[in-house]
Image (cartoon, rainbow, N blue to C red):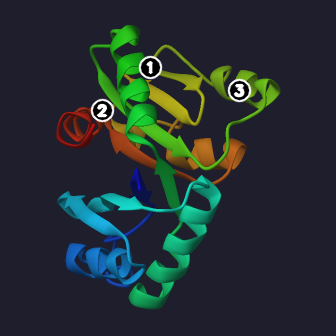
Amino acid sequence: MTTYLAFLRAINLGAKRKFPKDDIVAAVEGLGWTDVRTHINTGNVRFDCPLRSRAKVEAALEQAFAERAGFEVPTIVLTPAELREVAERAEAFGHDGAHYVSFLKQEPSPEVVRRVEELSSAEAVAKVGGRAVHLMLDTAYHQTRLGNATVEKHLGVATNRNLTVVRTLVEKWC
């Protein structure tokens, strides 16, 4: 069995995208996967499963979530080691302002990384490392032009967590 961490995109936003933790757990357990745990109601899930392919894990979860929730739930899967690496990279940046991480389905090409990082400004800096984009902000998240929507425009499906959640998940699950 391999342990994975799944990050669900765009759930529990507004009235039409409700997907409670208990339903998430039921969907994952319905796949026959074990040791399922969640953290807060924003789509953070830890589980063990026999699959070795991240793409197959994501596809199975997305199908199970769509059937259970009644809408598509893009899902990004990391190993505990990958999440730990994301947190370590964040610490190395040493940013004192708001810090968010957008997790990506695919690792971007160097050219796309360059384009995204060039969007940085004095108030908002993007640094890409593997399948994670670190957004370090000196302004409010909802006031910056360099947020998850911009990341998705250039890098495809992504889901965003603040660094506090990332650190907590590393402590709990890694």
Separation (CA) of disc 3 from disc 2: 20 Å
Against 106, residue 15 (above or below) is: below
Residue at coordinates 62% horizontally, 64% vertically from top-left?
56
The local crowd at label 2, few if under 14, some if 14 to 19, many if 20 or more residues have their Cα within 10 Å, is many
The amino acid on which the numbered mark 3 sits, given as a three-letter code, is Val
- Name the side, left or right, on which 64 lies relative to 91: right
Question: Which quadrant of the rendered structure holds the C terminus?
Answer: top left
The residue identified by callout 2 is 163
Residue 18, how many percent across, how many down? Answer: 31, 80
| Tag 1: amino acid | Glu
- The reply to whether residue 19 is visible in this rendering is no
- Give the CA separation, mark 1 to mark 2: 17 Å
Circle 3 residue: 113
Residue drawn at point x = 23 percent, y = 61 percent: 38
Q: Residues within 10 Å of mark 3 (few under 14, many from 20)?
A: some
For label 1, the residue is: 123
State if disc 2 and disc 3 touch (CB < 8 Å).
no
**Mark 1 closeness class: few <14, some 14–19, many ≥20 residues within 10 Å:** some
Q: Secondary structure at mark 3?
A: helix
Residue 52 quadrant:
bottom right
Q: Nearer the viewer, residue 94 or 6?
A: 6
Task: Name the mark on residue 3.
Answer: none
Residue 101 point in image, percent of width and height: 43, 36
